[in-house]
Amino acid sequence: MDGFIGRRAELGMLDDLIAPVQKGSRTGRPGRAVLLRGRRRVGKSRLVEEFVERSGHPHVFFTAVGGSRDGDLDGFATEVSASDLPEAHRFAGFGTPQSWDAAFSALAHALPKETPSIVVLDEMPYVVREDPTFEGALQKAFDRELSKLPVLLILIGSDIAMMEQLNTYGRPFYQRGTEMVVPPLSPHDVATTLDLSPADAFDAFLISGGLPLILEEWPTGATPWDYLEDALRRPTSALLVSAERSLAAEFPTQAQARTVLSAIGHGERTFTTIGQAAGELNPGAVTRALELLAGRNMVAAELPLSTKPSRETRYRVTDPYLRFWLSFLGPGMAAVERGRGDRVVDTIRKSWTSWRGRAIEPVLRDALWRLADDLLPDGTDVVGGYWTRTNDPEIDLVGADRSPIAKKITFVGSVKWLENKPFDTRDLARLIHHRDQLPGAQQDTPMLAVARSGRGPDGVTTLGPADLLAAWA
């Protein structure tokens, strides 16, 4: 794959951002900035490289390494001097700047004054952490010089929490940059990239999480099991190493957060069972770990969706790939390293049906939310689920006008994600029974069936993989 199937929306957003830079501004400030964030290894840098190449504008692309402030300043000077900016030689004459204030001032002299250019600062959180004056220097340079030039400043970071904070009230760069999020490739992108059937594409998405590096090593047309058997023969495959590298970068010192994340990845969903599985951590430690994980968008805390309030919070790992890795690959690394990846594949096969049935639910809810205007009853603005402490009832799909406490329930639904098995009359009877127990649902509340087979009984709308894949088309 070329890494850009499914990136039309992101490239279009960057095109929109550079448009006023190219056209100029009535205020005399054509310069623009964008704060671009996304999970590690999701393809942010590659996306920007493609955008820069397509634009044809002179540019500089600097990637911080985070060793030291002086090291990154020297690297920045080297990149600008070697760039195709028309006045790059002027930057070289300044030598290595002693501060970011000086670096940005010299950069402004190297940028063209009449034609557009692009400046990329990748891995910016490294620089922010190593130099507390960086944000102020950036704000000063943008306000006084860069915004007056036809330049698009692209600031990239994988530390999602920090990138979000950079544009909050009280921070120097507040409201100076447009925020942009780069998501993983979607299930539809996976299907297109790998030439898979809709059903297999969803399985591949649950395994890869839509990460480009994993999809690049996935042979076109290979089934999920073909790919797993091949990838687990190689300890260095992207499937195995991507999560460990991301976790090491996200949590270099927070061992308790890693432990709590592993407990959730292994299937624990409630506060109490997470604490128990994490080694009997005290409630305060679990709370702090969950807050850290939620703040970094690695864990979602969800409440039942109905017309009555509930405290039955459940937690899940937000990234499908990381959920798969924590469930199977992390625990199986020792076996892979001694050449027994086949045993890990066997373990996955034994648990696959039950694991997939749970893991697919948030993906399907996202698909239905995206298809709400076309397929769901009017007034459906959120799609969630419903459960009680005893899981009686537990409803896979609930549509409503708002969350977590709805005014109106718009539909209820059930998922049967089994090979070649339809959503049958017994499943429908169970859904009707559970609907009767859902606060806010009525006897005439519409019902929806989602089946991997795409087949269901008369009298209920049934959607299959092909219908849901269209949500990202």
Image (tube, rainbow, N blue to C red):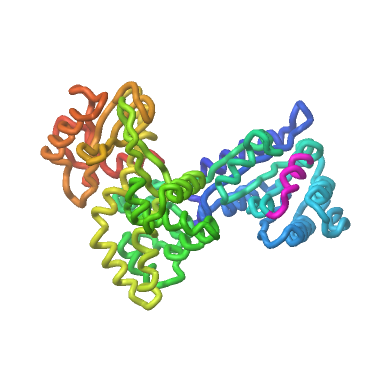
The quarter of the picture where the C terminus appears is top left
* Chain part drawn in magenta: 130-140
Observer-nearest of 288 and 40: 288
Outermost bottom residue: 338
Q: Is residue 312 magenta?
A: no
Q: Residue 252 at x, y = what percent?
A: 55, 60
Q: Residue 29 at x, y = what percent?
A: 76, 32
Observer-nearest of 160 and 418: 160
171, above or below 43, in the image: above
403, above or below 358, in the image: above
Image point 29% across, 52% down: which residue?
Answer: 356
- The dominant secondary structure in magenta is helix
31, above or below 327, in the image: above
Residue 436 in sight in this render: yes
Q: Does the magenta stretch include residue 132?
A: yes
Residue 194 in sight in this render: no
Outermost right residue: 93
In screen coordinates, is 168 left or right of 455?
Answer: right
In screen coordinates, is 61 left or right of 314?
Answer: right
Image point 53% across, 45% down: which residue?
Answer: 182
Image point 69% across, 33% down: which residue?
Answer: 20
